[in-house]
Amino acid sequence: MRRELKILLSAAGLFIVAGGLFGPIYAVFVEKIGGDLLTAGSAYGLYSISAGFLIFLISKWEDHVKHQEKLVVLGYLLSTIGFLGYLLIRTPIHLFIVQIILGLGEAVGTPAYDGLYSKYLDKGKFVSEWGLWESMHYILTAIAAVIGGFLANMLGFKILFIFMFFLSLSGLIISSLLVFDKFYIK
């Protein structure tokens, strides 16, 4: 497996865990900030619609960008800011803003990530290397869900959000190797 693919998988793995820690207990947090099920659904809807609509628009532009590695890093930077934003949420409006930032991060990073991932696949291993990505996503999300529930239950949401931030920051640093390698090592 190519080094670039290992970097992509490592960084993505950390972001998957960071997001997965919060997924199953999201509604409990929304209730703690004064929201209800409609708030939780609306906030997640804002994330999804902003990510989906912007991916559609941004991906057309990203086809023409020379250094997609920078877009992956930018997407992770925006997502890291979003994870940090969870620490600042006090009202449902704050949650909506954070969800839009996370959607923007997803929209900037995902098309470039997918393009680079496809570019770095080993010939004859397209299916197994995409299978590695897919299986990693499900397995890490499952592990993170259990750990996230445990952490929030034992230590509270603040510690959970700090942990999510540091995981995403680690993924951001690892992803920056794509840019560093591209421009300074090769």
Image (cartoon, rainbow, N blue to C red):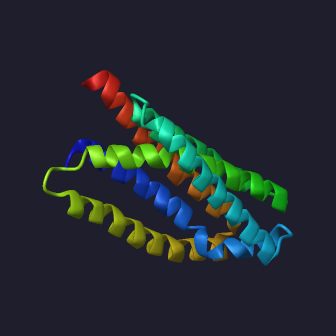
Q: Is residue 185 above or below residue 118?
A: above
User: Residue 98, percent across and down?
Assistant: 71, 52
Q: Specify the quadrant of the image occupied by residue 155.
A: bottom right
Q: Between 37 and 21, which is closer to the camera in this rendering?
A: 37
Q: Specify the quadrant of the image occupied by residue 24.
A: bottom right
Q: Between 133 and 22, which is closer to the camera in this rendering?
A: 133
Residue at x 34% of width, y 23% of height: 183
The quarter of the picture where the C terminus appears is top left
User: Residue 106, percent across and down?
Assistant: 55, 50
Q: Can residue 73 be seen at all in this image of the molecule?
A: no
User: Residue 107, percent across and down?
Assistant: 55, 48
Residue at x 59% of width, y 52% of height: 165
User: Residue 9, percent across and down?
Assistant: 35, 53
Q: Can residue 95 be seen at all in this image of the molecule?
A: yes
Q: Is residue 181 above or below residue 2?
A: above
Q: In this view, does 59 lie above or below 124?
A: above
Residue at x 49% of width, y 70% of height: 144
User: Quick check: 70 left or right of 8?
Assistant: right
User: Quick check: 115 left or right of 39?
Assistant: left
Q: Residue furthest left?
A: 124
